[in-house]
Amino acid sequence: MNLIRYTLLLGISFSLACQATKQLSAEAIEQQATTAKKNGEWLQAAQLFETLYQRSPTDETANYEAGTNYLKANHLQKGLQVLKSFDPQYDNKEMEWNGRLARLAKAYYKTEQFAEVQKIVEQYVYPKMYRGLAREHLKSLIQLNKSEVLAKYFLQYQQSGIYDDKGKSTNLGFLYRAICNELLLVGEQELLNKYAAAYSEWANQRLPKDQLNWAIASFYAQTYDTAILYLQAAIEQEKSPRHQLELIGLLGICYAKTNKVTQVKTQLDKINSFPALPPRHDTFGAKWYHQARIQVALGQYDQATQLLQQAIQQKSEFWSNRFKEDGLLKDVFGQADFELLVKENQ
């Protein structure tokens, strides 16, 4: 769609939304926004949260939610515009971390303004590094081909720790997986081998309790026959349905890479018949998404694109580690149907 026309239509849509909510209280608007977000209506949620933010420009939470939901709806420039508009003097300095800055970094990453992500990190004054910001930072350094700076900051995050949105320390598997995916995405095989080996060494020290990271590290090392054994073991141990589904998908890719067609079909069938996930994870269209990854590994690009379309129909969050950010989907990039799918959902 023409950018000017798109911006005009989005502006009209937002104006209509504002008119519809003009007489509502802030509490009523927030309730509507929260319901829209829960139901995967990302654009509606974004517009409602933006209304709240416009009523109260010092409301950091409303700004965060508006920007986040615009990104989920794949309205990237609008999400960036909203997040950038927040006056930093109103940042909550009493917090130990700042998740809104991570969303701003995500918006810069997705609009390929990678140097801006590094600026956010350099100006970050909070004692706890929010893990989402650390992830976008390391990914951006890879995109900028700054391998030495990447190593420096990764070591820094190892030493200082990374934290989730509850302020809890998160293990480094979160960053290792992001690094390996990004290196796979940009085709830096030598550096991928290096970080996959480091990931494996780190994961080995966490055995036998943490089979998940050990299996995924082996997958990124691309030792697929070995990874098959580790993935099978991890699936048996894993209690989280979401992680089980991811591991089954990776196992299917390993079988595809080693030409074990019968076993590939078994994994596709397992995913297709997988029990319903909790609502938060069903919104990712996860069952269709993981099948699509396997189909890409098989070279079945048409089937993969059809499955990704089904993921979108399940109100999939069209962002982190999805579609254009997924190194395991890169072989389908450039295919006409896939590119049309991406364009239609912008």
Image: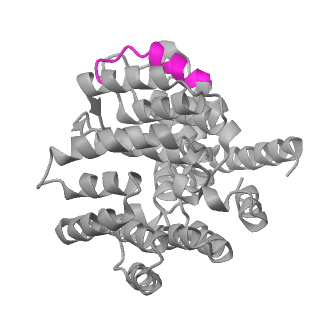
Pinpoint residue 241: horizontal percent, then vertical percent: 29, 68
**Can the viewer see residue 25 in this picture?**
no
Pinpoint residue 320: horizontal percent, then vertical percent: 51, 48
Residue at (57% x, 28% y) in the render? 145
Name above or below for residue 79 compared with residue 247. above
Residue at (40% x, 52% y) in the render? 220
Pinpoint residue 216: horizontal percent, then vertical percent: 33, 55
Magenta stretch containing residue 127, yes or no? Answer: yes
Name above or below for residue 277 compared with residue 340. below
**Magenta span of residues:** 115-128
Residue at (51% x, 54% y) in the render? 32
Residue at (54% x, 53% y) in the render? 326
Residue 267 appears in which quarter of the rendering?
Answer: bottom left
Q: Given the current orientation, which residue lies at the most extreme left position?
A: 208
* Front in this rendered view, residue 305 or 34: 305
Left or right: 274 as drawn, with respect to 84: left
Left or right: 116 as drawn, with respect to 32: right
